[in-house]
């Protein structure tokens, strides 16, 4: 059903500070940065830059406003791991299979994620305590 782990998402209060830490101290490379108004985030992808299929990235997520998924997560938990993302080839098919098992997906239709990917999420209560993102990369 899943191709690999696409990324792990970390909620951070300050994107520039987080990029500085994960590149200068931890030694990862900044690969991509964008703002997604619909998701209410300013985000960055970091990793090795090797385009191996199994090579998961780390997504840094800073809120554009307090009343957003990341804003609420930070207020409740402070910074830290917010999501786990599985890569899929066919998001609509995988969504249908998971719905068939009774799992709630957060959106009736896919939304746009990083780099023009198609995304949806399994509710954390149904994914056993983890906010699970499904990512179909842009063609
Ligand atoms: N991981 C694990 N559990 C979580 C969670 C998370 N990230 N966020 C919330 N929960 C838990 C809450 O603790 C709560 O548990 P309790 O009832 O035991 O207290 C439960 O889920 C339900 O919470 P809720 O009040 O129904 O919903 P919230 O307002 O907390 O919102 C969620 C949670 C997942 C629906 C919301 O964060 C959301 O819509 N997320 C999807 C979008 C998103 O995360 N966008 C930002 C990233 C963008 C990107 O990846 O591109």
Image: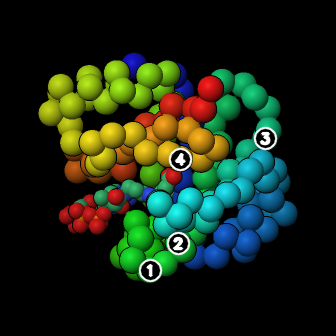
Q: Is residue 139 visible?
A: yes
Q: Say which residue appears at 41% left-offset and 71% top-offset.
A: 68
Of the residues under marks 4 and 3, which one precedes in the sequence?
3
Q: Quadrant of ligand 1?
A: bottom left
Within-10-Å neighbours for mark 1: few <14, some 14–19, many 20+: few
Of the residues under marks 4 and 2, which one precedes in the sequence?
2
Mark 4 and 1 residues: CB-CB less than 8 Å, in contact?
no
Seen from the viewer's position, the closer of residues 114 and 26 is: 114
Within-10-Å neighbours for mark 2: few <14, some 14–19, many 20+: many
Q: Is residue 128 visible?
A: no
- Reading the image, the residue beneath label 1 is 66
Q: Is mark 4 within 8 Å of ligand 1?
A: yes
Name the spot of residue 2 as percent of width and height, x first.
45, 23
| Dot 1: element | loop
Q: How far is mark 1 from mark 2, CA to CA?
A: 7 Å
Q: Which quarter of the rendered picture does the C terminus lie within? A: top right
Q: How far is mark 4 from mark 1, CA to CA?
A: 20 Å
| Dot 2: element | strand
Mark 3 and 2 residues: CB-CB less than 8 Å, in contact?
no
Of the residues under marks 3 and 2, which one precedes in the sequence?
3
Which label sits on residue 113?
4
- Reading the image, the residue beneath label 2 is 63
Reply above or below: 15 against 134.
below
- Reading the image, the residue beneath label 3 is 48
């Amino acid at each position: 059903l899943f191709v690999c782990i696409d990324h792990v998402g970390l909620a951070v209060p300050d994107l520039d500070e987080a990029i500085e830490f994960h590149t200068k101290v931890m030694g990862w490379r900044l690969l991509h940065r964008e703002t997604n108004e619909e998701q209410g985030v300013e985000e960055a992808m970091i990793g090795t830059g090797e385009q191996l299929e199994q090579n998961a990235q780390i997504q840094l997520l800073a809120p554009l406003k307090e009343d957003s998924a990341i804003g609420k997560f930070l207020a409740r938990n402070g910074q830290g791991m917010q999501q786990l993302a599985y890569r899929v080839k066919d998001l609509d098919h995988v969504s249908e299979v998971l719905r068939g098992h009774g799992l709630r997906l957060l959106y009736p239709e896919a939304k746009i994620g990083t780099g023009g990917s198609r995304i949806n999420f399994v509710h954390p209560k149904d994914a056993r305590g983890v906010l699970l993102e499904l990512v179909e990369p842009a063609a």
